[in-house]
Amino acid sequence: MKKVSILNHVIGPVMRGPSSSHTAGPWRIGCMARRLLGRTPERAVFSFHPSSSLAVCYHDQGSDLAFTSGLLGRSLTEPDFSSVLSLAPGLGLDISFECRTFPEADHPNSSLLTLWGGDRKLVIHSRSTGGGSFEIASLNGFPLLITGERHELLLSVSVNEVPDLPEIRGVECELIRSGEGYLIHASSGKPMPEDLFAGLPGKAEGHTVFAAEPVMFPMPGTGLCSTAAGMISAAEQTGISLGKAALAYEEELLGIDKAILQREMSHRLAIMTASVKQGFSDDLPMKLLRPSAGKLWKSAEKGSLFVGGPHARAAIRSMAALHVCASGGVVCAAPTGGAAGVIPGVLVTLANDLHVPEEKLLDALWAAGAIGMFHDSRSTFAAEVAGCQVEIGAAGAMAAAAVVEAAGGTPRQACDAAATVFQNVMGSVCDLIQGVVEIPCHSRNAALASQAFLCSDLVLSGYTSPIPLDETISAVDSVGRMLPEELRCTSRGGLALCPSARAMPRLDKTNSNQGGKQ
């Protein structure tokens, strides 16, 4: 089972919208490629398979901007992010994007990147795997796996005899053969000695060394447990909540003191809160929708809602946060960009309507992170792989656990509430209209924010899920992978094919979206 960090992969990253698979993941790929090259590239060519999700939406969802920003070593949250393609030539980078077939394509978000810099050329096959996570699957034809949380050192040699691998405690080494050469891949959760490859056969004849620091928090630990059943048992034995258990898990995995982890989570909570506040503006330029959260909020304040209450206010706040994401603003993916409204809407409602203090809000975020960690350990956050259920559905499940945590519920109740949400959305498709993360994403974020409160209330009042969370997640993953390609973020099925959806005008390509006002 893979290692999953709550801060690396679940509550985060802090990013620009609209989609973590198409901005945060590509940005991290660009950063890692730049580090492996050892410099800013002079030329870069990105290739996307014509049938892939990236081929459909790499421009509309800002992947081209994110790849370019990463290659240039620029932050994803730079104010001039939207202008980076025009800035690139002046910064010494000639970059282009193309759609073509290539044999390595094995994922909806596969890309083949060819880089030139100085006397080096790199060909990198990568995958953006959801929620900002990524994999580099090959380098110059050598199959390997780089995921951005470890220090990497690679030595390419041309020798007739098989070189010996260095043996250093804490360093994982593998020997990879391709054609007439070998690649030694050393990887560690901690920095490695610069002379790791000194004295190896072939090094004096002709070699190339590639080195890269991680683009996320390194994970030197093992993680205390990665299943809901295991963490429930551990938390019950020690008498702590799910949120406290999740914080302990992250401390052991990252080797970082709890106080530092809490400060980082507090920063992410602040980003979420700011995104809700900003989202009530009428001046957010989206591509298909005009901002409506501000208008809905005024109706709620006037008492115009038929039922209303915290459920409805959480839903409206979630739409506000997603307005910011859809307009390319700064949000915290939780667990993805397309689901970045659910947890902010719920957390701000807990704070403002139910007066939950920040300390408990942080515990609630850690509890939400635990649910996401259980999910990502055995499944994926990529709608391209398993549908909307693993993005907005996962956010709803995480938010339900957060509500239970804030209410003082038990770890088992938090997991039952999460399982109940997952069971209610199992099989939901990703059918985004015109390849844009706006419709039906906004209404689904709102609905799942509301459902988080509903399912937590059911569990807190005595309901228990007959199917435990771990089994539910396995079922969700299985169902999602059965969905046809047309229903997994390709805009070739579902609502995306409705005549009214296809006829919707693109506001970003006309003058009718000035100020985003109606």
Image (spheres, helix red, strand yellow):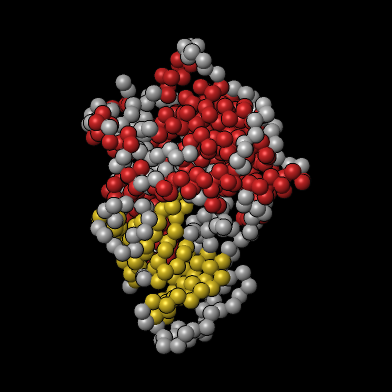
**Rendered view: 3 above or below 20:** below
**Rendered view: 334 above or below 177:** above
Dividing the picture into quadrants, the one containing residue 443 is top left
Question: Outermost residue toward the bottom?
Answer: 160
Rendered residue at 46%/32% (across/down): 445
Rendered residue at 30%/36% (across/down): 496
Q: Where residue 371 sits: x, y (%)?
A: 58, 43
Q: In the rendered image, is residue 55 in sight?
A: yes
Q: In the rendered image, is residue 278 in sight?
A: no
Dividing the picture into quadrants, the one containing residue 267 is top right
Q: Is residue 488 left or right of residue 508?
A: right
Q: Nearer the viewer, residue 444 or 34?
A: 444
Q: Where residue 67 sits: x, y (%)?
A: 36, 53
Rendered residue at 62%/52% (across/down): 226
Q: Is residue 50 left or right of residue 489?
A: left
Question: Outermost residue toward the right?
Answer: 238
Question: Outermost residue toward the front?
Answer: 466
Q: Where residue 495 sits: x, y (%)?
A: 32, 34
Q: Nearer the viewer, residue 302 or 79?
A: 302
> The N terminus appears in which quarter of the rendering?
bottom right
> The C terminus appears in which quarter of the rendering?
top left
Number of disc labels: 0
Rendered residue at 56%/43% (across/down): 472
Q: Where residue 513 sits: x, y (%)?
A: 28, 28
